[in-house]
Image: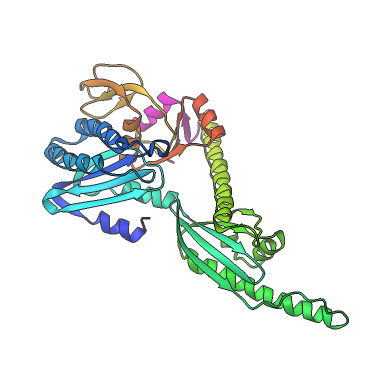
């Protein structure tokens, strides 16, 4: 898991010898294919050789040999890996990621941490709360991986079968302690969330979850993305977290559908959206893209200029922009790479309905800058 302080530390690394920044995407379905990372890296390396300035070509070859040697014996883990390497400075930083990353290799005097910042901002921590009347358990899920856990226990009297005039008074006594417990839980959530954006998933009975909503600050209540029922007597911790994961997946599916529908509607009304391969590539060439949308596994064949890096789904020998030599190849990774280097965000669309709609439009679209 990568935090903001760690990203700032990595971003501060500098060397006039040239630092290689390599992002490699891994397919979880091929996690048992040992050389998957090597294959992905070598594919991205071919793109980098035609784009990295002449000044850094020697550094690119120097560090890429080091990376290939490492990846050859590396056991695949997660959904991506990022490597920062500079042999003359004895610099070697490797991080595995549990979120999708596009393939990207670059060399410069500094590390390319912009994509890490995107990932941090685009995958806010998820807090899972399992609530009972006298106790609660908070789980922190950071970048798709289970993090810390916090237990909250309160002294709330149980129900009793005493009748007569004392019953209402004792019930009020119980509810008073229950409300104090809820306030304690709300404070724990605020403390664990801090000042960073979070998503909150609530588990418990309908009664306890509804009661918590009444004491949550409005800002925290707005971060709730779903609720789920919990049988605290019979559910294991693994079963509870799996129910929470289903809530998260349903939320992500709805968010992807909303984003794809919004971009499609904006494109059709001539506003801040483009949909389809060529319209999106044209917007990319003009550096207008704020967020690039593409379906997971998309393959686009076309041309890449070896001089200026312009990409197109058309076949040409000379670049129409600068007149440089062009080569025909699969261009999807180059499209993503150019978008990132231009400061755009990227969104891999995975959910079935959003994926199908975007695929009908060519599998590519973008939200444009203002």
| Foreground pick, 130 / 51 | 130
| Foreground pick, 186 / 230 | 230
Relative to 361, 24 lies left or right: left
**Residue 307 in the image, given as x and y percentages of width and height:** 20, 28
**Residue 197 in the image, given as x and y percentages of width and height:** 48, 57
In the figure, 370 relative to 191: above or below?
Answer: above
Is residue 319 among what the camera can see? no
Q: Quadrant of the N terminus?
A: bottom left
Is residue 359 among what the camera can see? yes
Question: Quick check: is 133 in the magenta stretch?
Answer: no
Where, by quadrant of the figure, is residue 357 drawn?
Answer: top right
Q: Quadrant of the C terminus?
A: top left
Relative to 275, 164 lies left or right: right
| Foreground pick, 343 / 45 | 45
Question: Quick check: is 280 in the magenta stretch?
Answer: yes
**Residue 354 in the image, given as x and y percentages of width and height:** 54, 34
In the figure, 363 relative to 59: above or below?
Answer: above
**Residue 7 in the image, given as x and y percentages of width and height:** 31, 56
Relative to 230, 331 lies left or right: left
Residue at the spot 24% in from the left edge and 16% down from the top edge: 317
In the figure, 84 relative to 134: above or below?
Answer: above
Q: Which residues are magenta?
A: 270-285
Residue at the spot 56% in from the left edge and 58% down from the top edge: 237
């Amino acid at each position: 898991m990568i935090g903001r302080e760690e990203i700032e530390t990595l971003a501060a690394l500098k060397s006039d010898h040239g630092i290689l920044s390599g992002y490699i995407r891994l397919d979880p379905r091929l996690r048992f294919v040992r050389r998957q990372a090597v294959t992905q890296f070598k594919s991205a390396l071919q793109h980098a050789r035609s784009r990295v300035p002449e000044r850094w070509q020697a550094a690119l070859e120097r560090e890429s040999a080091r990376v290939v040697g490492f990846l050859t014996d590396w056991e695949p883990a997660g959904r991506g890996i990022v490597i920062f390497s500079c042999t003359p400075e004895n610099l070697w930083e490797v991080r595995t990621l549990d979120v999708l990353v596009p393939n990207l290799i670059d060399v410069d005097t500094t590390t390319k941490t912009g994509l890490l910042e995107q990932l941090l901002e685009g995958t806010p921590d998820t807090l899972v709360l399992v609530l009972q009347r006298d106790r609660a358990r908070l789980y922190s899920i950071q970048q798709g991986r289970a993090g810390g856990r916090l237990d909250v226990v309160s002294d709330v009297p149980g129900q009793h079968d005493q009748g007569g005039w004392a019953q209402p008074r004792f019930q009020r006594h119980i509810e008073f302690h229950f409300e104090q417990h809820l306030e304690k839980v709300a404070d724990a959530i605020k403390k664990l969330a801090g000042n960073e954006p979070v998503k909150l998933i609530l588990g418990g009975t309908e009664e306890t979850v509804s009661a918590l909503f009444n004491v949550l600050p409005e800002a925290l209540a707005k971060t709730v993305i779903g609720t789920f029922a919990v049988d605290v007597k019979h559910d294991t911790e693994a079963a509870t977290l799996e129910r929470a994961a289903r809530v998260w997946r349903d939320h992500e599916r709805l968010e992807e559908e909303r984003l794809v529908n919004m971009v499609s509607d904006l494109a059709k009304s001539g506003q801040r959206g483009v949909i389809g391969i060529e319209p999106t590539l044209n917007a990319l060439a003009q550096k207008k893209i704020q967020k690039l949308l593409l379906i997971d596994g998309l393959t686009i064949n076309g041309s890449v200029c070896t001089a200026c890096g312009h990409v197109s789904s058309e076949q040409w020998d000379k670049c129409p922009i600068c007149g440089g030599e062009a080569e025909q190849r699969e261009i999807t990774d180059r499209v993503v790479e150019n978008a990132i280097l231009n400061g755009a965000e990227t969104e891999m669309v995975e959910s079935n309905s959003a994926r199908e709609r975007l695929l009908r439009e060519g599998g590519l679209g973008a939200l444009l800058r203002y």
